Amino acid sequence: MIFLLGFLCPYFVQVSGGGEKTIAAVLVLCQGVGLAILTGRWLLWSIVTVLLVFLALIFPAPMRNVDALVIYGVGLIVPLRLFISSLAPGREPLVSALARQAHGGGALREDIALYTRLQTWFWVVFLVLMLLLPVFLLAGPPGAWLWPLKGGALGLLAILLVVEYGVRRLVIRNFDHVPPWAMIHVWKARSSDRT
């Protein structure tokens, strides 16, 4: 909830007429409190948060950009790690495991196993490219590197999920395909089983 407030509070401050410094400081403060609550390391995150709030008051725009970059990086590195580790020898590719669970837990057909393995590799490549995209965009117009951080990557992901569903229906015939939202439920169930 604190993290959600960390994203919403700066907009409330902005709407109420708060300046850039106040917005950046509130953003960092909410996220620091959220990290302290999640990790239970109050002293560490208190010191880090005070330092970051101080920097946010001095350099508000760069701190907001750094904050967006860190969240973007973590948001891509965590799933990338899951996808890559599932491709290790002796492990089931993540998309294969999700497909198997979505279809009752039995063994996958050979063509589906191959498709889901390739799809796992596709998502690895996509996530790596999304991590590198801001670096490539530094050569473009000023501020272009912020495009993926401000929703461009999420928009591209949504488009690719829809395209993949269509491609899957064309490539894999005679099969009861599950819609993308069913896979989200499987992902959530699998994640809650781990915790």
Image (spheres, rainbow, N blue to C red):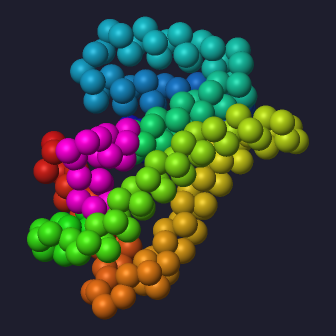
**Residue positioned 67% across, 42% down in the render:** 133
Q: In this orientation, does residue 89 appear?
A: yes
Q: Quadrant of residue 120?
A: bottom left
Vertical relation: 176 (above or below) 23: below
Name the quadrant of the N terminus: top left
Q: Position of residue 148 (x, y in %)?
A: 65, 48
Q: What's drawn in magenta, residue-wise?
A: 81-97
Viewed as shown, does residue 14 lie left or right of 182?
right
Q: Quadrant of residue 103?
A: bottom left
Q: Position of residue 15 (x, y in %)?
A: 66, 47
Determine if the magenta segment contains residue 48.
Answer: no
Closest to the observer, 100 or 62: 100
**Residue positioned 28% across, 62% down in the render:** 96
Vertical relation: 23 (above or below) 146: above
Closest to the observer, 90 or 67: 90
Q: In this orientation, does residue 27 appear?
A: no
Question: Residue furthest toward the right?
Answer: 141
Viewed as shown, does residue 59 lie left or right of 127?
right
**Residue positioned 32% across, 46% down in the render:** 87
